[in-house]
Image (cartoon, rainbow, N blue to C red):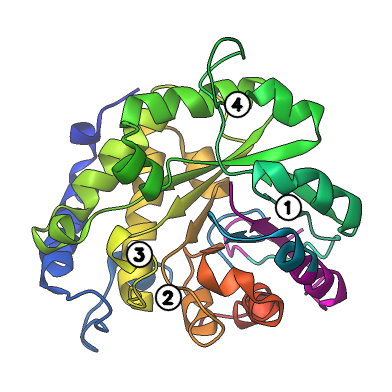
Amino acid sequence: MAAPSSLASSNMSRLAVSRSRAAAFAPGTPAPQQLRLGCSRRRAQRIVAMAGSGKFFVGGNWKCNGTKDSVSKLVSELNAATLESDVVTFVAPSTTGSLQTRRWLDHSLPDVVVAPPFIYIDQVKNSLTDRIELSAQNVWVGKGGAYTGEISAEQLVDIGCKWVILGHSERRNIIGEDDDFIGKKAAYALSQNVKVIACIGELLEEREAGKTFDVCFRQMKAYADNITNWTDVVIAYEPVWAIGTGKVASPEQAQEVHAAIRDWLKTNVSPDVASSIRIIYGGSVNAGNCADLAKKEDIDGFLVGGASLKGPDFATIVNSVTSKKVAA
């Protein structure tokens, strides 16, 4: 597998320009109107639903929030919510169209996933609609054993959890998990048939230094060095400076990074993976900004934090898929 430095010269040229632009953007500040992003220009004349060939994917990460009462209330709101029928929905409470045109015509029932805190999994499983599957927010790097406080992939499967969030910035920057450890956790989870939300993203100082792509590509490489089958992987780009801060990457900023990640996958993994994988955005996504973000071709959904604690707001974000109809 090629390293990031082996990117084709055409991609390097494009990404070099992107880096200089990324450094100039202040977090949450819209990109200049005259900005022409390479990926958007290249596909501007196509009818587009989304760049990834899978379904729209929305995740709600409750993080370390919730009580039995609040979980019960949120589950009731989710059970009552009307969600678009062609959306893959991922909720994470805390602890056939032409490939060329990318038109998404899959209207099958959505896969809906929730990841409660470990201590609330049974409560959620016993009260949430059968339409929604279970997930976890973390998992151990290998088979269980003498690892106090950890949960193994085998245990997740045993209780019916089919997804796990890995590589979240709070695990990286607060707990201290490094790239290689996260990559190995992802590989082991996948080997046990647990699907992975693989998070990446840069710190504020890294964006301001123009290192957004360097950081994201380094984190992607750690996944790629360990993962052999990407079928059950969703990539979540979450700029750390936008998580829980109220600051949001502009649609142009987010699209630029998503397109660059897809290009990296095309060169370093395979064109098929780059074409099919879903790359979702996370970072203060809410009911008010989701529609504009969803319109961007390479944004295939969202990983939502605070807004996912409010059932109606989360439903609005899920239904932002209706904004992803036609990009002329």
Task: Please determine whether, in this image, residue 321 is positioned above or below residue 167.
Answer: below
Magenta highlight range: 73-102
Q: Residue at x 71, y 67 (%)?
A: 70
Residue type of the residue flagged with mark 2: Ala
- Residue 298 in percent (x, y) is at 47, 63
> In the picture, residue 242 is in which quadrant?
bottom left
Query: Which residue does the numbered mark 4 point to in the structure image?
Result: 189
Query: Which residue does the numbered mark 1 point to in the structure image?
Result: 113
In the displayed structure image, the side of residue 44 where residue 29 appears, left or right = left
Q: Secondary structure at mark 2?
A: loop
Q: Residues within 10 Å of mark 2 (few under 14, many from 20)?
A: few
Q: Residues within 10 Å of mark 4 (few under 14, many from 20)?
A: many
Q: Nearer the viewer, mark 1 or mark 3?
A: 1
Residue 39: numbered disc? 3
- Residue 56 in percent (x, y) is at 64, 63
Task: Please determine whether, in this image, residue 227 is positioned above or below residue 290.
Answer: above
Q: Earlier in the sequence, mark 2 or mark 4?
A: 2
Q: Nearer the viewer, mark 2 or mark 4?
A: 4
Q: Earlier in the sequence, mark 2 or mark 3?
A: 3
Distance between the Cα atoms at labels 1 and 2?
Answer: 33 Å
- Residue 231 in percent (x, y) is at 63, 36
Pointers 1 and 3 in contact (C-beta within 8 Å): no
Report the front residue among 248 and 117: 117
Residue type of the residue flagged with mark 3: Cys
Q: Nearer the viewer, mark 1 or mark 2?
A: 1
- Residue 172 in percent (x, y) is at 34, 41
Query: Which residue does the numbered mark 2 point to in the structure image?
Result: 44
> In the picture, residue 158 is in which quadrant?
top right
Q: Secondary structure at mark 3?
A: helix
Residue type of the residue flagged with mark 4: Ala
Q: Nearer the viewer, mark 3 or mark 4?
A: 4
